[in-house]
Amino acid sequence: MPEEELLKKYANEIGKLRKRAKKLNLSDEEVNKLFKQCFDVIKSLLILLGVLIIFYVLLNVHQPTASVVLRNVQSLIYPGFSLLRYISVPIIKRFPSLTELYDESCLVENPFFYVFDMECWPCQNVYSVIDLSDYTNKSLYHSGIPYVFKSNQKYVTLNDIIKLYKENKDVFDKDASRLMSNSRDIKNIQDLINYSENSTKSSKTHISWRINRMNPARIVRTLFPRPQIISEWSGQSVERYIMIDEPNALHHVLPSFECSYVFVIQGSGQQTVILRPTQECSDSCKTVSVVLKPSYVLWYNWWYWRPISLPMANATETSISYINSYC
């Protein structure tokens, strides 16, 4: 649009504002004062933006300035955080549910995260998920290639999970009571209990129970102990999930973890897991799939695969699976 037309349009909009101001019984003096205040605010914001840009450029380009700033700021970090914590106390008292954020390693995941020049050899020659149940060569267990194996996992049903909750109700209600579900009626474990007793329940419900604190995690491990292929010296993540999928549940993406080595234990029922290569390796690697049966464990590396869970065709039993990771 030409400059003259823009100025004409601007003048017309100013005229409309003045007419509206007269209808509100505002004098020309008052209207001019309001315009001046608006321009002063815009001018101040532009000056602030300019100062921030200059400061940012100096910190990233001029090394002596960056050194001086960092040297003086470091001594203020601890007092600054102490002050922030003191200020946040009334807010925490008003909204106690915010304390759940203390256990989060990441509050917002970056959807644009991408690793350039990543080596994709662990998934490059994978055409199927191999079964290492009877394999004695343990060097393959941590080569990066996805595999399944039959573990000593006991059969775990929804009734077992509900029983575990009832026996440790105080712990779970305090530290791990929330559920994520595609059903509006299921928001916590008590809802799940009521739902499981309802004879008219749908067969498409998917439930994800996330546990991210030590006490409930320790209790859940009594149902899903550490698989034998994972060393006792491995650092297992506190964050873990129990997935509950009814026979015709909708497909869902398995969660991402802080640790790269992920294992999925099938407690009961069956599910099909499709392993899609990550964006970095999509040109070099192929999509593979595997059927997880009870007591079987799927192992994969999160850097190379993004799994999707699908219901089994003609399934009649609810799928219960447990997902955890280690570093």
Image (cartoon, rainbow, N blue to C red):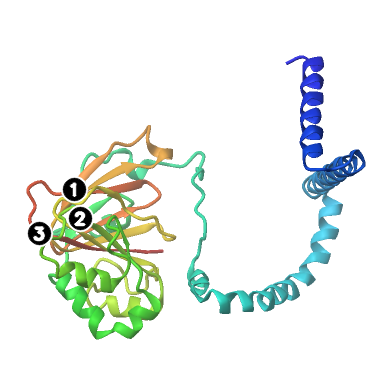
Which mark, by number, is residue 290?
Answer: 1
Classify the position of the N terminus by image quarter: top right
Which mark is in front, 2 or 3? 3
Kindly indicate whether the residue at mark 1 contacts the one at mark 2 (C-beta within 8 angstroms).
Answer: yes
Crowd around label 2: few <14 · some 14–19 · many ≥20 (10 Å) = many
Which secondary structure, mark 2? strand
Tell me the amino acid under the disc marked 1: Val
From this view, report whether residue 60 is shown above or below residue 185: above
Which mark, by number, is residue 148?
Answer: 2
Q: Residue at x 29, y 49 (%)?
A: 252
Q: Which of 96/237 is in front?
A: 96
Classify the position of the C terminus by image quarter: bottom left
The residue labelled by disc 3 is: 317
Q: Residue at x 20, y 75 (%)?
A: 162
Total marks placed: 3
Tell me the amino acid under the disc marked 2: Val
Tell me the amino acid under the disc marked 3: Glu
Which secondary structure, mark 1? strand
Crowd around label 3: few <14 · some 14–19 · many ≥20 (10 Å) = some
Please state the horizontal and vertical placement of residue 316, each as a whole percent of the image: 7, 56
